[in-house]
Amino acid sequence: MPAEIHAFPCREDNIGVLVHDPETGACAAIDAPGEAAILQALEKTGWTLSDILVTHRHADHVEGVLPLKKRFGCRVLTPRKAGEEIWGSDGLVGEGDVVKVGNLKARVWDTPGHCRDHVAFWFAEDKLAFAGDTLFTLGCGRVSESTYGEMWSSLVKFTRLPSETKIYSGHDYVLANARFALAVEPDNDALKKRAAEAEAAKAEGRFLVPTTMGEEKATNPFLRVAEKGVQKAADREGDGPEAVFKALREWKNRFR
């Protein structure tokens, strides 16, 4: 049976996600930004938390781990490269590992860039990818503790996924990302349509998560570094993808 997904807002701009296996009743939270929002989501869905899959150790992604584990006795899987920095871990995971939520299977990817310990979870059978703070709708995470080359390599992993793959990210930065993307590619019709959809969603109290890999390839400037217009906007015409990506990310860091 296919996975059931429930995404919901947490904190100021985090996005919480529950992944439910209807066959076994198992349910995983992707990260634990806060206990209260996750409890509310569980009450709304009627699901019972069995697992927490952590993408990285930043406080706004793990704040709810310990209270949720105390309440539900759930299993907590955390990035191997975080070591003992995340309290409450029951197991460390990294590149190539397979984790199960009931009968649902996810492949773990190491995706350093936003931070050194970052991982992502790819549920191939359901065509679902949980990107944490690596890939956002119309954007990507800031680079810290890693090189721009490492972040670019992490993003490339996502570009190899089928176009229909649904991408769930850890934050709702869509409107800010859309403004920057339009500064890079003001004549991109697909991007202009996506930006309008983001504005409409915000007005209705929604967010454009998940996105799809196909939509991101068509509209996300950080994945479009081979496009001549993107290279020109970044003042890196003819440069390799890593150099163009670095220029874009540094531009985004100071963009207002």
Image (tube, rainbow, N blue to C red):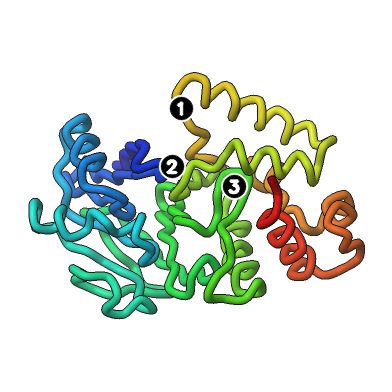
Residue 46 lies, with reference to residue 70, above or below; the image says: above
19 or 15: which is nearer to us? 15
The image quadrant of residue 97 is bottom left
The amino acid marked with disc number 1 is Arg
In the picture provided, is 41 more to the left or to the right than 207? Answer: left
The amino acid marked with disc number 3 is Met
In contact (CB < 8 Å): disc 2 and disc 1: no
In the picture provided, is 105 more to the left or to the right than 217? Answer: left
- The CA distance from mark 2 to mark 3 is 22 Å
Residue located 35% across and 56% down the image: 61
Q: Which residue is mark 3?
A: 213
- The CA distance from mark 2 to mark 1 is 12 Å
Q: Which residue is mark 2?
A: 13
Q: Position of residue 30 (x, y in %)?
A: 33, 53
In the picture provided, is 57 more to the left or to the right than 194? Answer: left
Residue located 86% across and 68% down the image: 239
Comes first in the chain, label 2 or label 3: 2
Residue 106 lies, with reference to residue 49, above or below; the image says: below
Q: Position of residue 99 (x, y in %)?
A: 30, 64
Q: Which residue is mark 1?
A: 206
